[in-house]
Amino acid sequence: MKIEVVYSTRTGDTEKLAEAIAREVGTTAKRASEFRSHDKVDLLFVGSGLYGWNVDPVARKLVHSLDSATVKRVAVFGTASSFAGNRRVTVQLQQLLRRRGFAASDAAYSCKARMWFLNRGRPDGEDLKRAAEFAHAAAKAAGPGVTK
């Protein structure tokens, strides 16, 4: 089963989650701007930060470029500076995917990110551990041959 992890970030916080997710499922995280997949992907993890209460335009462009003929399932993750923002980033990604006809999983992961002097040290070790747990559960739900 093929799994890909793709993300957009401006601060590096979402990249940290992407790398933890990729390690858990045995692949490499890729920036959304560099992602090109013409091969079939059984599970695609898509991540973004929240900027001005919206998903990063790079992540939005990625979602619009995806082909439902090659991507079977999608799980989302993200970062934001507040609890409300955390929910917003994953909901926006799920909505974008569903509008494009993808079966976006209801399962999603988000955590706090740095913003100026707020949330220093985030995402932290516990956030990364939870991201890996999320990835493991999403891969397990996607089918056999994915989990460690």
Image (spheres, rainbow, N blue to C red):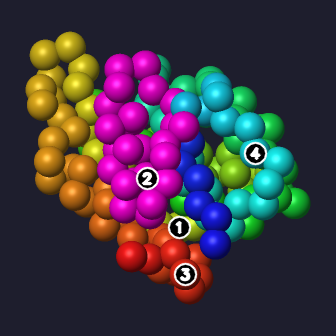
- The residues colored magenta run 7-30
Measured Cα–Cα span from mark 1 to mark 4: 23 Å
Which of disc 4 and disc 2 is earlier in sequence?
Answer: 2
- Residues packed near mark 1 inside 10 Å, few (<14), some (14 to 19) or many (20 plus): few
Measured Cα–Cα span from mark 3 to mark 1: 21 Å
Going by the image, does 69 lie left or right of 134?
A: right
Measured Cα–Cα span from mark 2 to mark 4: 16 Å
- Note whether residue 26 is visible: yes
Residue identified by numbered label 4 = 37
Residue identified by numbered label 2 = 22
Residue at x-position 58% and y-position 77%? 142
Which of disc 3 and disc 2 is earlier in sequence?
Answer: 2
Q: Which mark is residue 106?
A: 1
Measured Cα–Cα span from mark 2 to mark 1: 19 Å
Which type of secondary structure does the marked residue at label 2 adopt? helix
Up/down of 114 relative to 25, above or below: above
Which of disc 1 and disc 2 is earlier in sequence?
Answer: 2
Residue identified by numbered label 3 = 145
Hey, what amino acid is under mark 2?
A: Ala
User: Residue 99 placed where, x, y %?
Assistant: 77, 51
The C terminus appears in which quarter of the rendering? Answer: bottom left
Which of disc 4 and disc 1 is earlier in sequence?
Answer: 4
